[in-house]
Image (cartoon, coloured by chain):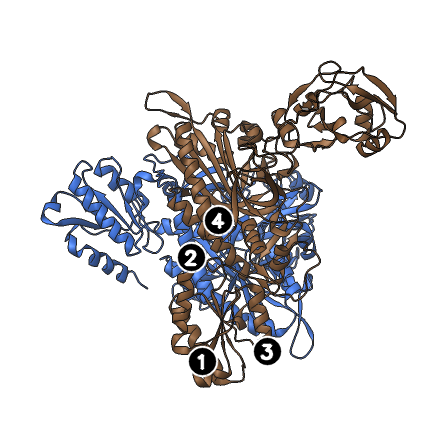
Chain colours: A blue, B brown
């Protein structure tokens, strides 16, 4: 492609709308533009990158024996009502009506559609196993779209659905996808980790997220420093710390005017946070629930939601609801006499002795509270793991890092096949539900994650297989006809070899061209300049390294070395 | 691909839902399945065909210098309100709200989005001309989705938008697209015609439709038998026939009880249809309009809509509205004293003498009516051309045939750039509106049109470049190990040559395999059968021809001949 014929939307300034680097660079490099909150248009350069990632995904899915489908984004409500998710998906699902007032949604995911396909088409175990995938546009009305395509409302997703005879078959299908995902993200040159993930209310038997370590990630991941354990903090079990052995003292109501927060209690009563238990109130869909954790602990909402069998909207109670439940102002909630639908107690609280709790009375707390004697509730692991905790697997030290989820694989089992009657006839003649898995990759988010890991102060540094173009050829001085002619010659030669080349033939200074190609992240650059008279051109890798002076006759070989070295 | 690993959704029965052949064959060959009215899922075989067509389109668009974008399908209402089309699009546009009650639509087309992009990004004449395209999913809530993907509610469209400095530039951009479209449909092996199309209320200066002749087409096209004239009947001008010269007789009201239709009048009064003028009543958006045409003529609604400056909904008045306008029962409408917003008179009526019209009084007509003396109205060409008419260009004989519109190119001019303030600074320093063109291809409809033109009693007959696979290799007897091994060998050899090959390794009779490959339309077939012992296999073209017996050592050469002969 000749740059003079291209629309090159590079920007020198950092757009105010972009907080994180990948978002800034995608805008500055002319990859995309915002159309509405969380909705983007792709410019030619950005679309090429997106397609390159799609092609890697397609290639590895095909190699793993999956078959490409393409489903509609416009989905009839009937299927969602059958699976029970029409009302459960909440405001994240875009809903609409057609001219005959039939209800549709824009697919946020496609389990229902593929299960419907399977029940219509799969009759016999002879047709199994089968793994169907698509690379298709999804819609999710995120409460807070942000970070560009990291969390957008319209995005390209590769979603795959496997159908097996039994759990053993599912395990094989799942393992194949695990391997395919590792291949995909390796080819994308991402530093990633597959981590154990919460399988939540989906009721599945296993789940892994593919996480790219990044400061801008919205997830937190626990890594064991000693064994290979890695898990989303949502999933990682926390152990209950034993409290010091003490004799039980008598429960005693104390006057604590204007002492509402944990810190005020610690300062006001002169005690350690470990001698307090806080009672938090949440609205979980239609229920009001209270959860107690030790004063220094953080609640793990996912664990509570799972204990409730799945929750769509989980949010802190407003003050009105707190007053209703506790008969007191906010800040004095406690387990004794509280009016809630469910009271959850983090296991650690049951191991504490003689601790302080809210009294459900304005300006009062209890001291010397003890679980069992003074109150009871549903005991379980409801807190977030911390770096002070030990590895749940080997007991080693752990670290916690932020990560971006680029893929998620999931053993669904028979959740959808049972609710939607997707059965097959097995070899023994019996009717059985299909055993399913589902497997997703966020394609645009993968693009952003690659940028987060591959950039420098001048812009993006694309890995060769992802780059929109492999190489740019730049004549140093456009008025120099020899330079222009030689650049053109090299450009045509590259094209004939199937190398994706750009010829920057714009009437611009060479510095501008360097800046643009570095911002866009073209892996290789050839400059045809002064030394052309000696038969020499300049070659430079975007990914560091010095300018190399190379004979024109040897330039193609030099480039081939680069392709060779970039092979996996 | 090994057929044993594929999901092959071939059906022996013709599905009841499908009326036309391409729809039936797309279902029977396992190309797609219906998800909802006018909404389809694509199975692997169908998706491959769709992608092959997309790639032809992409290739020719790139060669024509256009650049590929990808825009969102979820479009904010603001842009449509600016262009004035938010309220004009009517129920064909799917509208929805997000969680914050902001209005969106699912893009039925993208003029607004590209105009918005251009006004933000194009500042100077130096950036022009530019042509941007995308291959993207569109949504139109058709009143009557039918014929499978011929008229569906979700479909893949290639839409392109050109931006030029002036009309001369637009002419060049338009001509390039005209040529690209001819190349695309030629490569798709379609028997097509570019025809003059109505540019309607869009106010553009030129428009051509690419029509594939087909009985199932929803459009009618006029072809001149003598010159190259071809036009949509919507567009083709009809000439007003001169009536016989007569002296004007006196207008006379006649009693015509129970005579309501043209045929009843002809029989009841014993006169020729050419001595009658009918007055038709329509609701055009908010207006009630009457149109007069000669008794034997058909109204051309598009011509009336254009005369009104564009209409969203144009429909016959119900009897209540007729009674309101005429003060009479249905069947007695006429121009004298009618209460309508506009009265249109087909020019031919002005050339008639002493003719019969309705009297706007139940059971009465007038005879000896004459235009000018008895009534007046807006005169113009409002009737449909017929085969009895002459070519509007050369006066030769014409024929009328049905056609499927697979592409449409359009000179928009400054309609959108003016309403949306998309300007650039020209060389003379002046601010000018961008001059635009738009260019669409229905990709799924093209697929269906190819099937309509390429099939036989056994199924689809894909052209080589469109086919999901080039060739199928079939071992005649799966229990014969030599046959299976040789088939496998040939299959692997084909794959290495980059030929898209299928190996039908299912445990099925050879007859079943023949039937499936013919239904799907695979262009070439190799059968490894009895004569393997003599080193001979069978080769057969899907597109007619006998079974050829070919030495195994020569089979690759035979296939190469086929590729060579299929080159354009």
Asked if one can make out residue A230 in the rendered structure from this viewpoint, the answer is no
Task: Tell me the CA gap for discs 1 and 4.
Answer: 38 Å
Checking the image for residue A55, the label placed there is 2
Question: Which is more foreground, mark 2 or mark 3?
Answer: 3
Mark 3 touching mark 1, by CB under 8 A?
no
Question: Which is more foreground, mark 2 or mark 4?
Answer: 4
Task: Tell me the CA gap for discs 2 and 3.
Answer: 36 Å
Q: Is residue A294 above or below residue B345?
A: below
Could you tell me which chain the residue with mark 4 belongs to? B
Could you tell me which chain the residue with mark 2 belongs to? A
* Local secondary structure at mark 2: helix
Q: Which residue is mark 3?
A: B509
Checking the image for residue A378, the label placed there is none
Specify few, some or many for label 3: CA neighbours under 10 Å numbering under 14, 14-19, or 20 or more: few
* Local secondary structure at mark 4: helix
Q: Which residue is mark 4?
A: B185
Question: Which is more foreground, mark 1 or mark 2?
Answer: 1
> Mark 4 or mark 1, which is nearer the start of the sequence?
4
Left or right, A468 with respect to B439, comes to left
Left or right, A257 with respect to A567, comes to right
Task: Tell me the CA gap for discs 3 and 1.
Answer: 20 Å
Q: Which residue is mark 1?
A: B536
> Mark 1 or mark 3, which is nearer the start of the sequence?
3
Please tell me if label 2 and label 3 are on a single chain: no
Please tell me if label 1 and label 4 are on a single chain: yes
Mark 1 touching mark 4, by CB under 8 A?
no
Mark 2 touching mark 3, by CB under 8 A?
no
Task: Tell me the CA gap for discs 4 and 3.
Answer: 38 Å
Please tell me if label 3 and label 1 are on a single chain: yes
Q: Residue at x 66, y 23 (%)?
A: B347
Could you tell me which chain the residue with mark 3 belongs to? B
- Residue A435 occupies quadrant: bottom right
């Amino acid at each position: 492609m000749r740059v003079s014929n291209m629309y090159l939307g590079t920007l020198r300034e950092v757009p105010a709308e972009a907080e994180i680097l990948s978002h800034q660079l995608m805008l500055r490099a002319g990859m995309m533009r915002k159309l509405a909150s969380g909705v983007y248009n792709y410019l030619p350069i950005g679309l090429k990158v997106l397609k390159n990632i799609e092609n890697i995904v397609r290639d590895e899915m095909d190699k793993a024996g999956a078959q490409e489908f393409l489903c509609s984004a416009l989905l009839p409500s009937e299927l969602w009502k059958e699976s029970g998710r029409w009302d459960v998906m909440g405001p994240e699902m875009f809903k609409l009506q057609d001219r005959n007032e039939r209800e549709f949604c824009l697919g946020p995911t496609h389990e229902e559609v593929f299960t419907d396909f399977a029940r219509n088409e799969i009759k016999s175990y002879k047709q199994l196993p089968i793994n169907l995938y698509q690379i298709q546009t999804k819609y999710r009305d995120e409460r807070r779209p942000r970070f560009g395509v990291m969390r957008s409302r319209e995005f390209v997703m590769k979603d795959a659905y496997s159908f097996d005879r039994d759990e053993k078959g599912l395990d094989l299908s799942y393992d194949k996808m695990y391997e395919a995902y590792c291949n995909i993200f390796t080819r994308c040159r991402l530093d990633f980790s597959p981590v154990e993930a919460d399988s939540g209310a989906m009721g599945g038997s296993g789940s892994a997220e593919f996480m790219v370590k990044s400061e801008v990630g919205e997830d937190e991941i626990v890594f064991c420093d000693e064994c290979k354990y890695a898990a989303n903090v949502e999933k990682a079990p926390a152990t209950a710390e034993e409290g010091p052995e003490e004799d039980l003292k008598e429960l005693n109501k104390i006057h604590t005017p204007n002492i509402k927060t944990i810190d005020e209690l610690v300062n006001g009563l002169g005690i350690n946070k470990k001698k307090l238990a806080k009672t938090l109130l949440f609205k979980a869909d239609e229920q009001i629930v209270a959860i107690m954790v030790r004063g220094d602990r953080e609640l793990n909402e996912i664990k509570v939601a799972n204990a409730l069998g799945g929750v769509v909207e989980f949010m802190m109670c407003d003050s009105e609801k707190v007053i209703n439940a506790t008969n007191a102002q906010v800040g004095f909630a406690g387990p004794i006499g509280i009016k809630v639908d469910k009271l959850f107690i983090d296991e650690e609280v049951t191991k504490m002795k003689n601790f302080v709790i809210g009294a459900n009375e304005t300006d009062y707390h209890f001291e010397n509270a003890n679980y069992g004697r003074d109150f009871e509730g549903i005991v379980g692991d409801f807190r977030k793991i911390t770096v002070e905790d030990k590895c749940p697997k080997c007991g080693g030290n752990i670290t916690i890092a932020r990560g971006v989820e680029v893929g998620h694989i999931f053993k669904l089992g028979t959740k959808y096949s049972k609710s939607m009657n997707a059965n097959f006839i097995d070899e023994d003649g019996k009717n059985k539900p299909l055993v399913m898995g589902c497997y997703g990759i966020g394609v645009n988010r993968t693009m952003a994650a690659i940028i987060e890991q591959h950039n420098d102060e001048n812009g993006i540094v694309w890995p060769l297989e992802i780059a929109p173009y492999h190489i740019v050829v730049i004549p140093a001085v456009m008025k120099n006809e020899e330079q222009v002619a030689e650049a053109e010659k090299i450009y045509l030669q590259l094209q004939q070899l199937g190398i994706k080349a750009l010829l920057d033939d714009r009437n611009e200074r060479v510095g501008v061209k360097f800046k643009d190609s570095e911002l866009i992240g073209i892996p290789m650059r050839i400059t045809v300049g002064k030394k052309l008279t000696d038969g020499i051109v300049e070659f430079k890798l975007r990914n560091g390294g010095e300018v190399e002076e190379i004979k024109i006759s040897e330039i193609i070989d030099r480039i081939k070395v680069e392709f060779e070295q970039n092979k996996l």
